[in-house]
Image (cartoon, rainbow, N blue to C red):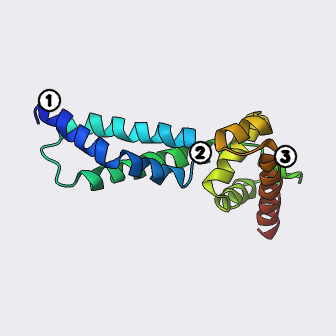
Amino acid sequence: MEDENIAALFGEIYEKYYKKILRFFRADFSCEDSEDLTQQSFLRLWAWLPGAGSVKNGGALIFRIAKNVCADRYRSTALRLDTMPLYDFVDIPAPSGWHYAVELRIALRSLSVKEQEILLMKAQGFTSDEIGGAFGLSGSAVRTRLQKIKKKLQSEIHSN
């Protein structure tokens, strides 16, 4: 594809799908993160287009890229959460052995993406107000959500 055709195709896809991709990410992420993930999606599209022979459906392409960006974000969050001292957060003693890792994964899968992000930010030392700013919540709403997350995790760990 020629540079002019690439730029024109990219511009067409961008104009038509930017808001739709942004809404796709806003279902699971904060406004700021949604904008970042949308930008990442369009950057990947820009990098991919020069090697493409032709594009039959720009919408399908950008949504496939957005889903991959979303999956990458989930994997990244899951890896960071796996290393977190979860048992300290839920105030129960951590068992020894391989059961620990299995219980952690099962418990973390019970959380939504937003809950995982809130938990991760708390573990990284962010205050409730800072977390709230990232998600458009008040500090007290974040503290309430953290208590619900804690109860959910305790329930999951005790049921396994």
Determine whether, in the image, residue 46 is placed left or right of residue 158. Answer: left
Tell me the distance, in whole angstroms, between the alpha carbons under discs 1 and 3. Answer: 54 Å
Q: Circle 3 sits on which residue? A: 88
Tell me the distance, in whole angstroms, between the alpha carbons under discs 1 and 2. Answer: 34 Å
Name the residue type under label 2. Ser
Number of residue marks:
3
Secondary structure at badge 2 equals loop
> For the point 64% across and 60% down, which residue is it?
109
Q: Circle 1 sits on which residue? A: 3
Q: Circle 2 sits on which residue? A: 30
Determine whether, in the image, residue 133 is placed left or right of residue 19. Answer: right
91 or 28, which is in the foreground?
28
Give above or below for 139 relative to 92: above
> Where residue 121 sits in the image (x, y, percent)?
70, 39
Q: Quadrant of the N terminus?
A: top left
Name the residue type under label 1. Asp
58 or 90, which is in the foreground?
58
Q: Which is in the foreground here, disc 2 or disc 3?
A: 2
Q: Are marks 2 and 3 in contact (CB under 8 Å)?
A: no
> Where residue 160 sits in the image (x, y, percent)?
76, 68
The furthest residue to the bottom: 159
Secondary structure at badge 1 equals helix
Task: Please tell me which of labels 1 and 2 falls first in the chain.
Answer: 1
Disc 3 packing (10 Å; few <14; some 14–19; many ≥20): few
> Where residue 135 sits in the image (x, y, percent)?
66, 44
